[in-house]
Image (cartoon, rainbow, N blue to C red):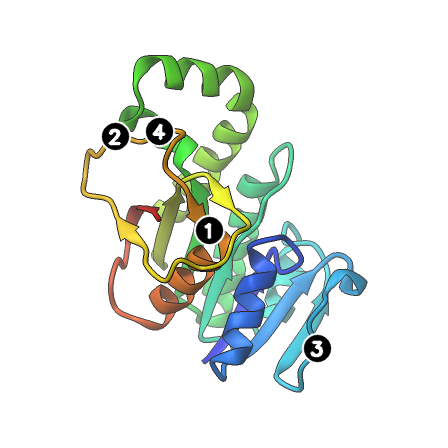
Amino acid sequence: MNLVVLGATGRTGRLVVEQALAAGHTVTALVRSPEKLTTSSPNLRVVTGEATDRAAVSRALEGADAVISALGGNGSVIADSTSAIVAAARQAGVSRIVVLSSWLVERDRMHGLTRALTGLTMGTMIKDKNAGEQVLRQSDLDWTIAYASPLSDGPAGGSVVVLPEGARRNLSQKISRADVAAWMLQTAAGDEHRRRSVGITG
């Protein structure tokens, strides 16, 4: 597959790129700072630009089969980038997109105290992710949103648990970035979880 990776220089996005190349995929990485990419390969194409810039996203999506987004950021970067991605994907005829979100967005799955504390400390990020995900849900794209448990930088455990609907979320649940990267790759290439949001943990 020809995969476009957004957030490719981040701690999770970097692993998506590495694992995708190792699996034989062609990867296009849209990055603000190409010098931060630690991976090189004949199968890696680098496009310099912002994920909030529709023109830059359109350049990255040329010839793509699917998009994997591990974007993070401050302010309204998720909402703004999602709008750019949806518009560019429609123009390019790319329908498949897998987006990494956070368990913090699933407010109704938390106990009251956890919900209150995370709302106070992470409210701006949660609002931004919610806004972006609403844009994605209202689109005609073939999307999957992954609500990952707190991320760790440890080695892959080799398994990802897809949580049942309504399962409670808490701070004690963890998942490695390597496992998240592998799950997103598998999901982008497969038929499961299309037009669904999915809670995942280790």
Q: Residues within 10 Å of mark 4 (few under 14, many from 20)?
A: some
Residue position for label 3 = 40
Q: Amino acid at mark 2?
A: Arg
Q: Residues within 10 Å of mark 1 (few under 14, many from 20)?
A: many
Query: Is residue 63 visible from the viewing direction of this image?
Result: no
Q: Amino acid at mark 4?
A: Asn
For the residues marked 4 and 3, what is the alpha-carbon distance in whole angstroms? 37 Å
Q: Residues within 10 Å of mark 2 (few under 14, many from 20)?
A: some
Q: Amino acid at mark 1?
A: Ser
Viewed as shown, does residue 121 lie left or right of 184?
A: right
Q: Amino acid at mark 3?
A: Ser
Earlier-in-chain disc, 4 versus 3: 3
Earlier-in-chain disc, 1 versus 2: 2
Does the residue at mark 4 contact the one at mark 3 (Cβ under 8 Å)? Answer: no
Residue position for label 2 = 168
Earlier-in-chain disc, 1 versus 4: 4
Q: In this rendering, which labeled residue sits more in front, label 1 or label 2?
A: 1
**Residue located farthest toward the left when viewing the structure as drawn:** 165
Residue position for label 1 = 176
Q: Secondary structure at mark 3?
A: loop
